[in-house]
Image (cartoon, coloured by chain):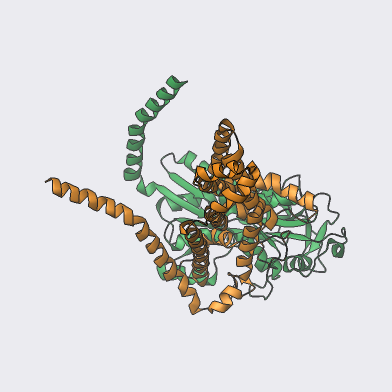
Amino acid sequence: MMKAFANLIKKIFAVFPVFFLVCATVSSAQESRSVQIKGSDTMVNLGQAWAEVFMGHHPEALLAVTGGGSGTGIAALLNGTCDIAQSSRKISEKEYALASEKFQNVQEIPTAMDAVAFVVHPDNPVKQVTIEQLSDIFTGKMENWKELGGEDKPILALSRERNSGTHVYVLEDVVRKGNPKGPEEFAPSVLMMPSSQAIEQEVSSNRAAIGYFGLGYLSPHLRALAVREDRTGEFIAPGLESALDGSYPVSRPLYFYLPGEPRGLVKEFIDFVLSEEGQAVVLDMQFVPLRKDAPQV
Amino acid sequence: MRKYYEFVVEGLIFASGIASIIFVLLIFIFLLKEGLMVFRDVGLFDFLFGKFWYPISEPPRLGILPLILGSLWVTVGATIISVPLGIACAIFIGEIAPGWLREILKAGVELLAAIPSIVLGFIGLVTLVPLVKKFFGLPTGLTAIAGSIMLAFMAMPTIVSIMEDALNAVPKGYREGSIAMGATKWQTIHRIVLPSASSGIIAAVMLGIGRVIGETMAVMMITGNAAVIPHTFFQPVRTMTATIAAEMGETVQGSEHYFALFAIGIVLFAITFLVNLLADLSLHRKPVRA
């Protein structure tokens, strides 16, 4: 046991110089071949999948993809600590103004689409809602499942934290019903969950809960509600098809933001993301490809 | 030559000695510089007693009363749970347990202190939260009480180890005298040892509270983070620490929201400073004559 341990230590020390050598070569020779990608938690798995396939074609390239939330990504872009910010919401006017002060030519590139699913416990009898009702639930106007034809139980509304692009998107497009400057707010009693998994965990074990997240997180432990945009429309269940043909009302583009015209490796990466192969990755990851390049489903 | 050497060594030791003070000062100055900027946009009274926290709206509403109360509720709950438990545990370890058991228990308590808070938070999320929901029949288990229970675990090691030191510091003669007078063991502990160690006990409790107020990750994971003004332990709450942790990554440097988070930091700093000061004062108070 002790001997094995000592051997391990020896091995580690033997590898160290090699490791440093490799690091040094990589950082000196390949400095321009590394790209920092940061932002949306919704997109982090997608970004990683793109990066893996891309690095498969370009073994010399180094792409680092990290999450933290869309706001985190855009803040990192402004502070100059990432090359590409992934964002599941549009950059705000304030952020755009700040970015324009620092950079000549801020770029916005839509890369894929995502649908936001509103989920409840599978035993919850409520199966469909309108945008109006969702807004009432999250602003605290509607407090009991009874009002939606469900059980006589207080509604427990769950939201993502404020650093989430999904939070901002739902705030503007659902809570404020498409008017970003509307007066509606999430009620103070809405629980702010630190991640999509935390929402999944709570909804799957709580019959009175309702939460939301991107399509990719749907699981058999939850049921997604069908949503209707206005009084005349139909209730549409969220899914790849309904998001692709645009009939599901709560879907949004996912963006890359860049500080300037893409050049070098960043440009190659973006060309890849927008190519047919890149868009096939989108479909693989349970997101919705951009319509113009969409493969037939 | 030798004198020169002495001088250098003394200088180095002096520098290391005051380094921590300098760091604290620098941190405090930075905190003040960034945090006070928020008061260009919002008055002190509206900041501390505003009931709504909507930092990303236009215009933002920056009232931190729900956050202060959230932190207070969780802390009060954790204190109510951990103090009696901690005191009882320290008495058992320090006064009653036989030598071999004492060592095992001490090691156990120290091990408890070594568990990273995010691990405790994760365990709390999957085990404690559903339990709290079921046990109290609540709409959700993500509540102040779940946070309090989890934080009580984190405060315990601090309380127990400092209190045990305080009990150890009580001169042996006190105990022997008491027993010689015909007092029972419990009478000795309760009438002689505890009063003599009271200042250390207060310090232990204060430092435990300080630990609880500053705790972040576990609280963020299990208290629900809803910025309501809490009325009971069985409601979701949003603490100051969780707010800073959840929102700091997102803010743009130089925005009102960014300054507001630093101002919350000042409030937290002031509270922990006060708590530590109280602990220090009670530690250096002259021991009460038993």
Q: Nearer the viewer, residue A44 or B53?
A: B53
Inspect this view and state whether residue A258 appears. no
Name of the residue lying farthest toward the front = B181
Q: Position of residue B155 (x, y in %)?
A: 58, 50
Q: Quadrant of residue B232?
A: bottom right
Q: Position of residue B252 (x, y in %)?
A: 49, 66
Does residue B81 lie above or below A144 as drawn?
above
Chain letter for orange, please.
B
Name of the residue lying farthest toward the left = B1
Inspect this view and state whether residue B15 appears. yes
Q: Position of residue B213 (x, y in %)?
A: 57, 58
Q: Nearer the viewer, residue B49 or B34?
A: B49
Q: Quadrant of residue B284?
A: bottom left
Q: Position of residue A282 (x, y in %)?
A: 61, 48
Does residue A289 lie above or below A71 as drawn?
above
Instruction: Please tell me how many numbered marks the rendered image carries.
Output: 0
Q: Colour of chain A?
A: green
> Quadrant of the image for the C terminus of chain B?
bottom right
- Is residue A188 rendered to the left or right of residue A262? right
Q: Nearer the viewer, residue B184 or A161?
A: B184
- Is residue B20 rendered to the left or right of residue B45? left
